[in-house]
């Protein structure tokens, strides 16, 4: 997840909160990846038994890995290891960063939620996190309880740090430009891709058109 200072912003997809039929969602995912550059897919299934997460991961992980898209588990470093994911995302209520790193070793990705906190982000980066996630930048229909964040934190971070930033929360192809211009390295998006009125392929295409416009 290393990104030079002037790197083009990239998409970090988050799965919908529930996936009833992994094989059907796999088609949606293939469609999204057909739309253009995607760096990451995070499997985020809350309140779901481990065996369901495992079955879903076993369908989605190969699709991602065959296309060079990192497959990241949400919340659970133990499952990330067991299911051979490329990494894990941990929040402030999840396993501490140090525990996740100890379990996953130096080569897998560990990302950390920092909400709108410069302090949490500095702590995570100094501890060795592969990226820090800031948000929520907009109202999210995926997650109710969020902390409002302003693009200023992305600009501040990109000025002083090289650890990549991920912006999250209610992001769409229509509202994302200020985050890209502020220096976000990745945009994490769920609803803005899976529920796009023209479908996931078009959504990914439109995000990438904004990234191209900002980085030429
Ligand atoms: C890339 C990214 N950023 C932030 C989050 C939120 O993590 P967390 O605060 O642990 O909330 P839940 O996702 O567990 O509801 C994330 N998942 N991914
Ligand atoms: C998982 C998550 N975490 C957030 C935070 O602010 O930490 S917002 C969020 C939901 C992201 O989905 P959508 O793109 O549909 O808003
Ligand atoms: Mg979490």
Image: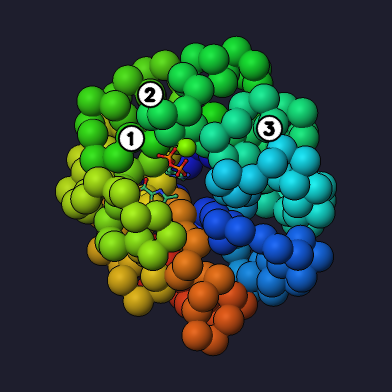
Q: Earlier in the sequence, mark 1 or mark 3?
A: 3
CA separation, marks 1 and 3?
A: 20 Å
The residue shown at (64%, 45%) is 48
Q: Counting residues from the N terminus, which is met first, the one under dot 2 or under dot 1?
A: 1
- Toward the viewer: 156 or 21? 21
Query: Which of the two discs, 2 and 1, sits closer to the camera?
Result: 1
Element class at badge 3: helix
Q: Between 108 and 59, which is closer to the camera in this rendering?
A: 59
Q: Which residue is mark 2?
A: 124
Q: Going from the N terminus, do you reach mark 3 or mark 2 first?
A: 3
In the image, which disc is placed on residue 8? none
Q: Are marks 3 and 2 in contact (CB under 8 Å)?
A: no
Q: Are marks 2 and 1 in contact (CB under 8 Å)?
A: yes
Image quarter of residue 72: top right
CB-based contact (under 8 Å), mark 1 and mark 3: no
Q: What residue is shown with label 3?
A: 80
Q: Which residue does the numbered mark 1 point to in the structure image?
A: 114
Question: Tag 1: Cα neighbours inside 10 Å, few (<14), some, or many (≥20)?
Answer: many
CA–CA distance between discs 2 and 1? 8 Å
Image height of 117 relative to 151, above or below: above
Q: Secondary structure at mark 1?
A: strand
Kindly report which numbered mark, 3 or 2, lies closer to the viewer in this rendering.
3
- Which residue is depicted at the point 56% across and 21% down? 100
Q: For the point 67% across and 51% down, which residue is it?
A: 69
Q: Does 95 sit above or below residue 12?
A: above
Q: Quadrant of residue 182?
A: bottom left
The percent coordinates of residue 10 (x first, y second) are 49, 56
Which image quarter holds the C terminus? bottom left
Q: CA distance from mark 3 to mark 2?
A: 19 Å
Q: Is mark 3 within 8 Å of ligand 3?
A: no
- Residue at the image position 62 percent from the left and 40 percent from the top: 73
Task: Return the residue found at the far bottom.
Answer: 198
């Amino acid at each position: 997840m290393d990104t030079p200072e002037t790197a083009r912003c990239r998409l970090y997809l988050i799965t919908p909160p529930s996936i009833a039929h992994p094989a059907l969602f796999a088609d949606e995912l293939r469609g999204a990846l057909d739309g253009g550059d995607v760096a990451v897919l995070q499997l985020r299934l809350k309140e779901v038994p481990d065996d369901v997460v495992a079955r879903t991961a076993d369908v989605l992980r190969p699709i991602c890995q065959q296309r060079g898209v990192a497959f990241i588990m949400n919340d659970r470093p133990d499952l990330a290891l067991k299911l051979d994911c490329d990494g894990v995302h941990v929040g402030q209520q999840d396993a501490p960063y140090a525990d996740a790193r100890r379990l996953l070793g130096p080569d897998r990705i560990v990302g950390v939620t920092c909400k709108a906190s410069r302090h949490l982000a500095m702590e995570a980066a100094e501890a060795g996190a592969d990226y820090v996630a800031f948000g929520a930048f907009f109202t999210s229909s995926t997650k109710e309880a969020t902390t409002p964040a302003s693009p200023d934190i992305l600009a501040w971070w990109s000025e002083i740090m090289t650890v990549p930033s991920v912006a999250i929360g209610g992001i769409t192809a229509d509202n994302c430009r200020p985050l890209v211009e502020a220096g976000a390295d990745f945009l994490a998006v769920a609803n803005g891709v899976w529920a796009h009125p023209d479908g996931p392929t078009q959504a990914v295409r439109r995000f990438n058109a904004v990234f191209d416009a900002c980085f030429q």
